[in-house]
Amino acid sequence: MMHPGLPPGWAALVGVAVVVLSLRTLVALRKPTIEPQVRRAAHSAPGTIMRHVTALGPWLLLLKIALVALFLLIVTAGLFGTPIPERNLATALTWNIWWAGLILTIFFVGSFWCAVCPWDTLAGWLVRRRLVRRAPTNNSLNLRVPRIIRSVWPALLLFIGLTWLELGTGLTTNPRATAILGLAMVVMATVSLALFERKAFCRYFCPVGRTIGFYSQLAPVELRPADIEVCARCTSLECYHGTDRVEPCPTHLAMGRLTENTYCTSCGNCVSSCPSENVVWRLRPPSIEAVQNARPHWDEACFLLALLALAGFHGITMLPLWEEGISSFARLVGDSGTLLLSFSIALLAGLAVPTMLYSGAVAATRRIAGIAVEYKQLFSGLAFVALPLAFTYHLAHNLGHVVRESAGIWTLVFNPLGAGMQPLSVAEKQARHMDLLIRPELLFTLQAGLILFGFWVALQVLRHRGQRLLPGGVLAGFTLLPMILLAIAFTGFHLWLLMQPMMMRL
Ligand code: SF4
Ligand code: SF4
């Protein structure tokens, strides 16, 4: 069953807006002004709600218990339920709802999922052996993570591996494999917690957590000091070290120096431990961190490019022409059976092509600008352009799946193992296909709006990062042409992907 794509009229509208915005940026003043970070009211309504949820232990604990129970139900359904993917809660909930919906939640509440993640909750209960509050002894060897892997490289490798499993081996249509993958994540989180200090799994290894972390740079909420001067005068640093009752920051963040959401798991420990009650949730312009606050690093730049590459690759594998293309390629390289070799080559190409395009655009920008800034520095600094492009396409793509494939999930809640169920008939598939959560016009408006928003943020990133990379403001106007063309190319590619009929996940 195929979903219809974005109508050409919508794509044309976005195309016109992209051209206008690009021309405006090209003729813009050579020295764009960097906006000061907007300090919004510390007690905004969403901020107050999240502060209460994270600061009040019982609410957070209840949420964690509910999600652990749901996770265990998914594992049970996957291991012991029907192998029919659309009739088993493990596959339907994990891939149709959770994985697709997770990206949507980041748009509203940043990394809040990490605060209630059942993998980490189970690992904590198994190792610390306490449901709430800080355990007197944390039952960990408390080793330091070796310097060589103190980066996002491990998470990037696991992210690529996860994509290979998900798309290459058909994991998404296999309830048992889905359950085993969930258990494997718990094992990795538990072993990491038992070996290393604090939560190394969340900071360095978890591909889902790092994806959420980077996308959270675009979230409209942040956890920050209410008064930066209070933190400047603070010598006890409870937010970093914890207290007798509250665990320290799991990812080694000191609130007074926090400028980006990337490694904050929204756990709320700092909210509970700060003796000055100086930590608050607040609203902010959603792009400000990617545009100017986040600091560039080489490994993180590569992760951002991988996000962009894999978002597009994911879209390609759901097109009707994918099956035909991969089969032809397999015949060419003499591959047969599961076509894993052909898929692996295609995946590597899917990673390499966007990276090479980006590298070429950075080199061209450097040459046109004639500036004496290191290539690696420019590569890392401008890589934030990938973030809004990847995030908004990922969101628009997932929105299509959630809106069109959520029907029927309630029947699985009452029969999670799918006992006695038959595969979906063509008529049932057709009925689900027509049963959208929102009107198609609204879906298309949201998808087109997201792609345009992503492009607009990408232009802001280029203008502001360009100025920052060379204080003289050389990287502005026409010198940014290669990078702007790159952003246009990816936006056009994403629009084209959204216009294609898309296969249902299950
Ligand atoms: S958040 Fe609280 S504990 Fe942390 S540095 Fe600021 S005042 Fe000190
Ligand atoms: S700064 Fe650290 S302690 Fe505070 S919510 Fe984020 S991860 Fe938790």
Image (tube, helix red, strand yellow):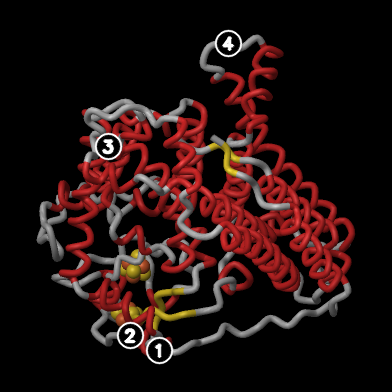
The tag earlier along the polypeptide, 4 or 3, is 3
Q: Residue at x 19, y 49 (%)?
A: 69
**Which residue is disc 4 drawn over?**
336
Report the label total: 4
> Mark 4 packing: few (<14 Cα in 10 Å), some, or many (20+)?
few
The tag earlier along the polypeptide, 2 or 4, is 2
The reply to whether residue 148 is in sight is no
The Cα atoms of the two marked residues, 3 and 1, are separated by: 42 Å
Query: Is 173 placed left or right of 22 in the picture?
Result: left
The answer to the question of whether label 1 and label 2 lie on touching residues, with beta carbons closer than 8 A, is yes
> Mark 2 packing: few (<14 Cα in 10 Å), some, or many (20+)?
many
**Which residue is disc 3 drawn over?**
183
The Cα atoms of the two marked residues, 1 and 4, are separated by: 62 Å
Q: Residue at x 11, y 52 (%)?
A: 129
Of tags 3 and 1, the one toward the viewer is: 3
Residue sitting nearer the eye, 247 or 416: 416
Q: Amino acid at mark 1?
A: Asp
Query: Is 161 placed left or right of 444 in the picture?
Result: left
Residue lying farthest to the front in this orientation: 427
Whether label 1 lies within 8 Å of ligand 1 gets the answer no
The tag earlier along the polypeptide, 1 or 2, is 1
**Which residue is disc 1 drawn over?**
227
The Cα atoms of the two marked residues, 3 and 2, are separated by: 38 Å
Of tags 4 and 3, the one toward the viewer is: 4
Q: Residue at x 71, y 13 (%)?
A: 332
Q: Relative to 326, is 331 above or below?
A: above
Secondary element at image label 4: loop
